[in-house]
Amino acid sequence: MIDQVPEPARPGGTVYGEPRRTPPVMPIVVGVAAVAVIGVGIVAWNSTGGAERAESAPPAVVPASTAPAVPASPVPARLTAGTWVVSPLGDPDTYLTTDGDFAALSAVDPLPLTVVAGLADDTCFAFRTDDGRYLRHFDYRLRFDAAEDSDLFRADATFCQEAGTEVGTVRLRSKNYPDHLVHRRGEQLYIDEPDGSDGFTAAASFMVQQP
């Protein structure tokens, strides 16, 4: 009897007539590789700011029409041409009035004053009573006198609002004595040089009100 010799293995990794079997370890290797690829993708996304952009998405914008309306605050009066009553700052129940020919402060008989352009400078102011007299300074004290056709009278009766005065507050400088402010001394009014104190500033500040 002749001995049979096994046929040699054919190229391609199979034995003739039998399919090649995949080693059992291959599915595990493929799964691990897929997980690694996914992990690398997540790390790359985070490193480019993707996570931050997702977390920092802008909040929804509320239309302006739905915002609650804020009531406007009343605006205090500013000195302009017209008719006004003048009071010391912080004392609205005391008024500028007359004591004979002199200007004075009193809790009774408020004196409405017609405010017009300054007689010596139309960027400043002059204060006139109903009977045609003007507020002016004479020997530094404020008084009411009938109009005179002189440069001195026109300058004496012209007062300029101090720069930087707040709305609703009036500080007045003499036109011909620009280093002097209208200033209260008790119930009397003068033009005085500021001494730099808060007390002087308060006594040289006035309010204007509708009569």
Image: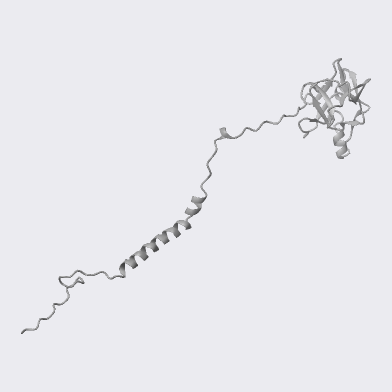
Classify 38 as above or below 122: below
Residue 71 percent across, percent down from the top left: 67, 31
- On-image quarter of the C terminus: top right
Determine the residue positioned at 90% across, 19% down: 145
Number of callouts: 0
Locate residue 161, reporting x and y percent. 80, 29
Q: Position of residue 141 (x, y in %)?
A: 92, 27
Q: Does any portion of residue 195 appear in the rendered image?
A: yes
Task: Kindly tell me whether residue 120 is visible in this rendering.
Answer: no
For the residue pair 43 and 118, the one nearer the viewer reads as: 43
Name which residue lies at 89% across and 39% down: 195
Closer-to-camera residue (86/5): 5
Give the residue at the far bottom of this rendering: 1
177 above or below 9? above
Question: Which quadrant of the structure image shows residue 66?
Answer: top right
Taking the view exactly as shown, the residue that stands out farthest to the left is 1
Residue 33 placement (x, y as % from top left): 36, 65
Figure colour scheme: one colour
| Foreground of the two, 30 or 179 | 30
Residue that protrudes farthest toward the top in the picture: 131
Q: In this view, does 189 lie to the left or right of 39?
A: right
* Quadrant where the N terminus is found in the figure: bottom left
Q: Could you say which quadrant of the image residue 132 lies in? A: top right
Report which quarter residue 109 is drawn in.
top right
